Structures are given as structure tokens and as C-alpha cells.
Amino acid sequence: MNLSIVSLSYTSYRGLQSPPVVVKLTSSFFCQTAAMSTSTGASSPYTTLSISHPAEFITHVELHRPEKRNSMNRAFWSEMVDCFNEISMNSDCRVVVLSGAGRLFTAGIDLTDVASDVLSPEGDDTARISWNLRKKLLKYQEAFTVIERCPKPVVVAIHGACIGGGVDLISACDIRMCTQDAWFQVKEVDIGLAADVGTLQRLPKVIGSRSLVNELALTARKMFADEAKSSGLVSRVFADKEAMMAGALEMAGEIAARSPVAVQGTKINLIYSRDHSVTEGLDYMATWNMSMLQTQDVMKSAQAAMEKKSPKSVVFSKF
Ligand SMILES: CCC/C=C/C=C/C(=O)SCCNC(=O)CCNC(=O)[C@H](O)C(C)(C)COP(=O)(O)OP(=O)(O)OC[C@H]1O[C@@H](n2cnc3c(N)ncnc32)[C@H](O)[C@@H]1OP(=O)(O)O
């Protein structure tokens, strides 16, 4: 599967001021996409992720190494990139629910596997060693940036512990919810490093208080569900995992029922605006909608609204 072509094309489109994108895909890519999109059970081409399709247009991605507390081994970091690139291109998916299998969401980086990868960079001198390590770190970062770059909204459902790399991961998601027993820990300082795959960049934009972010990142103290809610890290707290998964799927159903043109345009423009001035954001929005407003979805949705029908009654073309 030639995912590098997909990834490059999509990246370049995010850098442009208008949405059109030409994506060249190999036939093997389409084969995999088709195989996954028709799946209804928990089948998966991955070793650390389980993929299922609980309802039309909803993809459930489950971190699936419960015996190792879903810690993030080498395979995980590359499978995330493959998985979310596939989802980005799959018009049968309009929304993603992401959760963890077993006792907890994730124990963060796999300390037995990944540590050796980043702590033993290769190269003949300092320049080459540093350059190789930099390339590796950029690759690790991509595993979560790909969530943000995916135009389909990602609802993450967290139970039990969410440690280290787990916080990097959820910071890149669009909607966060958790169980009452959940706790969050920016653990990196405890293992001698500055969090380097997204927490320090994204968490300050998720939580309003910079002081709180600094406190969490500098002390590695645990934050529990109530504080996660009051600080804005999560928007909902559920009594237990069963209730949370039902809530996550219900929310995903609400999103999936709406125009994919509107939903994906909303996600992309929200992220663009987060990283730009209001003026730049408005300019990008106008350029975006000069083409996207020409969708048939506007007429269909407006007609349903006039007739006091639910958006769920409208059938939208694949997008
Ligand atoms: C370049 C990349 C940059 C990324 C940086 C990311 C950094 C981080 O993520 S820092 C955080 C690292 N994680 C930790 O420090 C957590 C360590 N684990 C725990 O504290 C506990 O395991 C936990 C509280 C999560 C769960 O406790 P519980 O009693 O439920 O389970 P255990 O018996 O401890 O573990 C069960 C098996 O899972 C293995 N395991 C757990 N965490 C990890 C891990 N992080 N890495 C590798 N393996 C892990 C544990 O060894 C047990 O395995 P086994 O003995 O074979 O049964």
C-alpha cells in the first residue's frame, strides 16, 4: 500500500488556502480500503489496534494490547499512521470513536520496546546521530498528528489510566469523554524527558489555564475525572465504561447523521482557526466555502429544517 503518497498529498492540501486536492492512489490502497470498509466485526490488519464498524459511517478504533495495558510499542506508532490515513480516505467513515481495551485506556509509551529505539540512535558522529534521532522523533509525532489531520472527527473515550503518550494522543482528538474512574498523567518528566509528541503543544490549547498545564507537565501529578471535566480536558464524565461507550456511540451517531461536507469542513476550519489569527481564519473559511457551499447537502439540509425534519432523515452522498 502506497501510504506515503496519500500522506504527502493530504499534507499539501492542509497547507493550501483552498480545499481541492488531487490524490493519487495505487490499486493496492483501494483493495485495503474496500476490505476494511465492508467489515462489520472487530477485524483488523493491525497488531495493536482493533477496528470495527458498530454502525453505518462509524469506525471504532480500539487500542488493543490489554495484557500490556495498551502501552505503545513500535508497531503501535506506525499502525496509527496507517490506520488514520486509511480512515481519512475512506468515504464510508464519517466519524471515529477511539477507546482502549481491558483495564485502562493506555499506560503510555512501551518502556521495554520504544525506549531502546530512541535511546540508541545510529550515526557516525554527533551531527548524524542527532539528525537520525530527529527523523525518528518526527515519525513518532506523526502517529498523533495524523489524528488531527484526519478530516473525520475523532471522539476519544477514556477509562482508567491515561498516562504519558496517552495524554499526547487524546490532546490530538476532537472530543474527549471519560469515566468517573479515569485519571490523566503527563508522566514524561518522571522518566527523564520532556513530552515530545504533542502534549506540550496541544494541551495548552485544550485546557484554558496555562498554569494548570504547566503544573501537570512539570510535576507529573495525576489529574482525576472531576478536575479533567472542570478544566475542560473532557466534556463529559460517565459512571462507567459501558455508559461511556454508549454515550460515545450516540454522539458519533449524531455526527455521522449530518452532512459530511459540513462536518469535515467544520473540523478542518476549527483546527485552522486554532492555529491562526481571526483574520486568517475568516479568510481561509471564505476560500473553503466558496467551493463547499456549492454542495447539494446545503439544499437537502435546509429543506429538512424547513420541513421540521431531523437531519437524520436526509441521505447524503458519500464524501
Ligand atoms: C519518542 C516517543 C515519545 C513518547 C513519550 C511517551 C512517554 C510516556 O508515555 S511516559 C509514561 C510511561 N508509562 C509509565 O510509566 C506507566 C508504567 N505502568 C504502570 O505504572 C502500571 O503498569 C499501570 C498503573 C499503568 C497499570 O498497573 P496494573 O497493575 O494494572 O498493571 P501491571 O501489572 O503493572 O502491568 C501489566 C503488564 O503490562 C506491562 N506494562 C504496563 N505498562 C507498561 C509500559 N508503559 N511499558 C511496557 N509494559 C508495560 C507490565 O510490565 C505488565 O506486563 P507483564 O509483567 O508481562 O504482565
Image: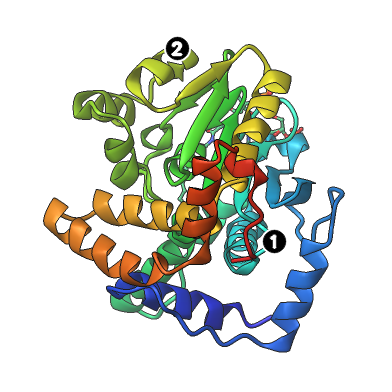
For ligand 1, which image quadrant applies?
top right
The image shows residue 202, relative to residue 222, as above or below, that is: below
| Three-letter amino acid code at the position of disc 1 | Asp
Residue at (44%, 43%) from the top-left corner? 168
The image shows residue 294, relative to residue 213, as above or below, that is: below
Which mark, by number, is residue 226?
Answer: 2
Which mark, by number, is residue 187?
Answer: none
Percent of width and height locating residue 302: 48, 49
Q: In this orientation, which residue lies closer to the viewer: 115 or 56? A: 56
Residue at (69%, 48%) from the top-left corner? 58
**In this rendering, would 61 be left or right of 137?**
right
Q: Which residue is the site of mark 1?
A: 92
Q: Residues within 10 Å of mark 1 (few under 14, many from 20)?
A: many
Q: CA distance from mark 1 to mark 2?
A: 36 Å
Q: In this orientation, which residue lies closer to the viewer: 233 or 72? A: 233
Quadrant for the N terminus, please: bottom right
